[in-house]
Image (cartoon, grey):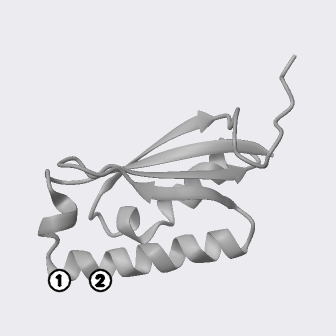
Protein backbone atom coordinates (compact mmCIF):
# COMPACT_ATOMS: atom_id res chain seq x y z
CA UNK A 1 0.00 0.00 0.00
CA UNK A 2 1.42 3.40 -0.98
CA UNK A 3 1.65 6.31 1.41
CA UNK A 4 0.46 9.80 0.59
CA UNK A 5 0.39 13.21 2.23
CA UNK A 6 -1.99 16.04 1.68
CA UNK A 7 -1.58 19.55 2.92
CA UNK A 8 -4.52 21.71 3.93
CA UNK A 9 -3.61 25.29 3.06
CA UNK A 10 -5.60 27.84 5.08
CA UNK A 11 -7.20 30.89 3.47
CA UNK A 12 -5.39 33.35 5.77
CA UNK A 13 -2.71 33.61 8.43
CA UNK A 14 -3.74 32.86 12.03
CA UNK A 15 -6.60 30.77 10.65
CA UNK A 16 -6.95 28.63 13.78
CA UNK A 17 -7.43 31.75 15.90
CA UNK A 18 -9.75 33.56 13.47
CA UNK A 19 -12.09 30.79 12.28
CA UNK A 20 -15.66 31.88 11.77
CA UNK A 21 -18.44 29.84 13.33
CA UNK A 22 -19.17 28.24 9.95
CA UNK A 23 -15.49 27.36 9.39
CA UNK A 24 -15.37 25.89 12.90
CA UNK A 25 -18.35 23.65 12.10
CA UNK A 26 -16.66 22.44 8.92
CA UNK A 27 -13.49 21.70 10.89
CA UNK A 28 -15.56 19.70 13.37
CA UNK A 29 -16.71 17.57 10.43
CA UNK A 30 -13.11 17.45 9.17
CA UNK A 31 -11.95 16.07 12.52
CA UNK A 32 -14.73 13.44 12.57
CA UNK A 33 -13.75 12.45 9.03
CA UNK A 34 -10.13 11.96 10.10
CA UNK A 35 -11.22 9.92 13.12
CA UNK A 36 -13.13 7.62 10.76
CA UNK A 37 -10.09 7.25 8.48
CA UNK A 38 -8.06 6.33 11.57
CA UNK A 39 -10.64 3.75 12.65
CA UNK A 40 -10.66 2.33 9.11
CA UNK A 41 -6.87 1.87 9.20
CA UNK A 42 -6.27 4.41 6.42
CA UNK A 43 -4.84 7.34 8.39
CA UNK A 44 -1.24 7.26 9.62
CA UNK A 45 -1.16 10.70 11.27
CA UNK A 46 -2.74 14.13 11.00
CA UNK A 47 -2.42 17.53 12.60
CA UNK A 48 -1.87 21.24 12.04
CA UNK A 49 1.33 23.18 12.02
CA UNK A 50 1.39 25.82 14.73
CA UNK A 51 2.24 29.50 14.52
CA UNK A 52 0.83 32.10 12.16
CA UNK A 53 0.50 29.71 9.18
CA UNK A 54 -1.73 26.79 10.21
CA UNK A 55 -1.06 24.33 7.39
CA UNK A 56 -2.60 20.95 8.14
CA UNK A 57 -0.99 17.66 7.18
CA UNK A 58 -2.58 14.28 6.69
CA UNK A 59 -0.48 11.17 6.05
CA UNK A 60 -2.45 8.15 4.88
CA UNK A 61 -2.37 5.00 2.78
CA UNK A 62 -4.04 4.45 -0.57
CA UNK A 63 -3.35 2.02 -3.41
CA UNK A 64 -2.84 4.66 -6.12
CA UNK A 65 -3.08 8.36 -6.91
CA UNK A 66 -6.72 8.23 -7.96
CA UNK A 67 -7.73 6.65 -4.66
CA UNK A 68 -5.50 9.08 -2.74
CA UNK A 69 -7.05 12.06 -4.53
CA UNK A 70 -10.54 10.75 -3.77
CA UNK A 71 -9.63 10.49 -0.07
CA UNK A 72 -8.23 14.03 -0.03
CA UNK A 73 -11.20 15.46 -1.89
CA UNK A 74 -13.63 13.77 0.52
CA UNK A 75 -12.19 15.77 3.43
CA UNK A 76 -15.00 18.16 4.42
CA UNK A 77 -12.61 21.11 4.84
CA UNK A 78 -11.48 20.70 1.22
CA UNK A 79 -14.81 19.56 -0.23
CA UNK A 80 -16.58 22.61 1.24
CA UNK A 81 -13.90 25.02 0.05
CA UNK A 82 -12.70 26.21 3.47
CA UNK A 83 -9.08 25.26 2.67
CA UNK A 84 -7.27 24.10 -0.44
CA UNK A 85 -5.66 20.68 -0.65
CA UNK A 86 -2.33 19.65 -2.12
CA UNK A 87 -1.60 15.95 -2.65
CA UNK A 88 1.88 14.42 -2.87
CA UNK A 89 3.32 10.90 -2.78
CA UNK A 90 5.02 10.25 0.56
CA UNK A 91 7.17 7.62 2.22
CA UNK A 92 7.29 7.13 5.95
CA UNK A 93 10.97 6.35 6.44
CA UNK A 94 11.19 6.51 10.22
CA UNK A 95 8.36 6.18 12.69
CA UNK A 96 8.60 5.26 16.33
CA UNK A 97 7.65 1.61 16.92
CA UNK A 98 7.63 0.90 13.18
CA UNK A 99 10.43 -0.59 11.13
CA UNK A 100 10.32 0.47 7.50
CA UNK A 101 12.19 -1.74 5.00
CA UNK A 102 14.69 0.04 2.80
CA UNK A 103 13.54 0.24 -0.82
CA UNK A 104 15.82 -1.29 -3.43
Residue bearing the label numbered 1 = 21
1 to the left or right of 9: right
Which one is in front, 55 or 6? 55
Q: Are marks 2 and 1 in contact (CB under 8 Å)?
A: yes
Q: Residue at x 29, y 63 (%)?
A: 81
14 to the left or right of 56: left
Residue bearing the label numbered 2 = 25
Q: Identify the element where label 1 is drawn.
A: helix
Residue 37: x, y in percent?
64, 69
Q: Residue at x 42, y 80 (%)?
A: 29
Which one is in front, 48 or 24? 48
Most extreme residue toward the top, as rendered?
104
Q: Residue at x 55, y 44 (%)?
A: 5
94 to the left or right of 81: right
100 to the left or right of 12: right
Q: Residues within 10 Å of mark 1 (few under 14, many from 20)?
A: few
Q: Residue at x 39, y 66 (%)?
A: 79
The quarter in which the C terminus is drawn is top right
Q: Is residue 16 above or below residue 35?
A: above
Q: CA distance from mark 2 to mark 1?
A: 6 Å
Query: In the rendering, which numbered label is found on residue 2?
Result: none
Amino acid sequence: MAEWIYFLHPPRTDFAETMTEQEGEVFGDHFSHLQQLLADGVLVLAGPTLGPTNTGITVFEAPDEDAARAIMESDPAIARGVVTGELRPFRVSLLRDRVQPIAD
